[in-house]
Amino acid sequence: MKYRYSVLILKDSNYQSERPCRRTDRHPILPGSRLKNYVEFVTGLGIPFEIVDVNEFNLSNILDDNLVRCTSVIIACPIGRLSAEQQEWLKDCSFRYGVSLIADSFLFSKRPFLEPFGIKKCRTTSFSMQKICSNDGGVLYKVRPYPFSSKGADFGYRPILRLLMQSWFSRRLSKKQEAHSLASFRNGIPAVVCYQFGEATNYFLNFQPGRIFHNGNRFHQFFKNILTNHSRCPSVSIQYERGVCLRMDDPGASERVHLKGFNDGVISRELWNELIQLLEGENAKLSVAYVAEWVDDGDPRRGTLIYRGTPVWERIPGKHYTSREVTYHVWEPDRHHDYASQYEAMRAGVNKGVISILSHGLTHLSVDIKGWLNSQDQYTNMEWYREFCEMVSDENVERGILIQHLEKSVEEIRQAFGVNTQIVVPSAHMRTEDTPGLAREAGFKILSSKETNLLWDHAMISNRKLGAFYPEEFKEAAALSNAGYPILFVFHDYDVYRKGAFWLKEQVIKLQNEGVKTFLAMEEWGALLMARMDVILNENDLLVKIDFTSSLDVGNFKGMIPLHIEAVVSEIRTADGATIPITSTGDSWTRTQVPYSYVTNGRLSLIAELNQDIDKNREGLHGA
């Protein structure tokens, strides 16, 4: 038999309250469904997966001739929605072919189907209190018994809701003698039960997964080990954990002239040179969300507009200018708005490979420019400075206009920097339900806001665990980084303008103190996240295919793809026979780095030869 490393997630479209792609940043405190959290988990940690509706689930989703198509099945629908025949398929594939089954106690209302999990009875709900600890005493999850926010203990509606939305309950279990607990609640009730069922090890979670997986904690890595360390086929993953993307928003925006409180100036050429030197010293990349066009308010009393080196005497309200060719002089000596010099310095950083350019929309302004020009609060109301979500205007923006803005921003960036960006950041992270679809239609692969939207051709998935975090949200970002997710650390150009390059240096040191090891450009971060990996064990050869064709374009990428193989490997080679050096090994794992130059037509194929019995990789079950 051949075995494929993949996770099958069973959902029920009639039951699930949230689609995997549904926007949840409007209610970030709510944990979301188990399906939502499982999908965020596997996409955020780069685990190959497939989602199948229970109404369409059949045996071929697991077993296809001599190929076992998945190593684990996560059940995210009520057990009662599985027919008797479907339950038999799951039990048979688990017992005979080692497919791990994973379900939680809150999916069970009756006794049937408890057998594969080593559970005799799953009874009434119990107040479980506070902690989940692994067998070695490590705290995997801990509730906070007080209202809280990102600042710590806090008061108000949202802190109280956060208090309530934690995992407070479990079910009373009676398990078989052969089943044992991998983790328990403080009161002794099992939290995770594992059971050897024929060839498989199955896992029973005694909590509501959405509430545990919502925020960063140690349980994420614990659960990842369950999916990766003991599968019939060794896991292969891209090692971007402990990685961070630094993203600066707003360079090029006319907001720096118009919006009071944020119109101090733009970063000077000299300060940009300091930033570039800092990035080179830290071997770090900075992704800049750039606003390609500058919008004139038409008021000469507020300052002088210089375009392409020439003063503009006939000012036209609402006229667009390319940001890289604008200089604006105000009547205050300490305020500088030399967009042209800023562009020249940024272009030098792009040429050095330490700065990458993203789209921050076309204007960073409401599409209703007339409404903005005629309003009494055009210089004070920041809600006018939202391009993809009308918050002040009653104007009904046509879909086509927004797509034109997106497409034009890409073209302007291509002309200015010579790059073809595939990532868009909506101004102030504000967007509508339609914005991801509009972005995909305009050719973007990622929409980055408070949650990252991965825009494949076949699906759109939003992920809160890959969301953008501002400096004041450092604790949440650190928790998710410690949980294994690559994080996105976001700040604005005015942060550096006001505080200097040393402020960014302090943020980098702070991140490094939390264990961050690499600072990736967002394009590489996104390409690795969206790559589709296929791993098949055929006798003693591990066949690995990484497909970037539905991901971001990696044709111009330099550097390496870091891979972790959960097995000891004697040799790794490409499909063409080129040998890939092994960088490090352990008792049960191997790491390597593959040059991007080996990616051909968006695809990479590798063969890893195992030098040990695959069953040895499954030893140490209790160490999950």
Image (cartoon, grey):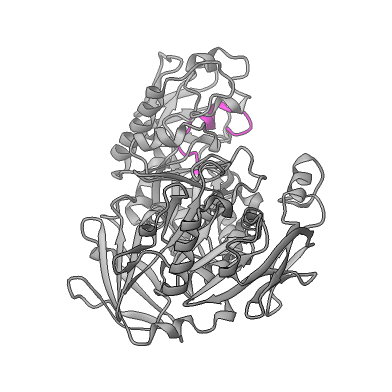
Q: What stretch is highlighted in magenta?
A: 249-263
Task: Say if 537 sits above or below 143 in the image.
Answer: below
- Find residue 255 and report its horizontal and vertical position in percent: 53, 30
- Find residue 376 and report its horizontal and vertical position in percent: 62, 14
- Residue 490 drawn in magenta: no
Q: Write the residue at 30% across / 40% down.
A: 414
- Find residue 39 and report its horizontal and vertical position in percent: 50, 53
The secondary structure that most of the magenta stretch takes on is loop
Quadrant of residue 359 in the image? Answer: top left
Q: Write the residue at 29% across / 79% down.
A: 539
Name the residue nearer the viewer: 480 or 9: 9
For residue 542, side relative to residue 56 (left or right): left
Task: Say if 29 sits above or below 133 in the image.
Answer: above
Query: For the image shown, how many numbered marks are present on the structure?
Result: 0
Task: Say if 455 sits above or below 230 in the image.
Answer: above
The quadrant of the image that shows the N terminus is bottom left
- Residue 257 drawn in magenta: yes
Task: Say if 20 sits above or below 352 in the image.
Answer: above
- Find residue 18 and report its horizontal and vertical position in percent: 56, 42
Q: Is residue 490 visible?
A: yes
Q: Write the residue at 28% across / 44% down.
A: 418
Furthest residue toward left: 576
For residue 399, side relative to residue 546 (left or right): right
Name the residue nearer the viewer: 375 or 59: 59
Quadrant of residue 116 in the image? Answer: bottom right
Q: Can residue 506 be seen in this view?
A: no
Name the residue nearer the viewer: 152 or 605: 605
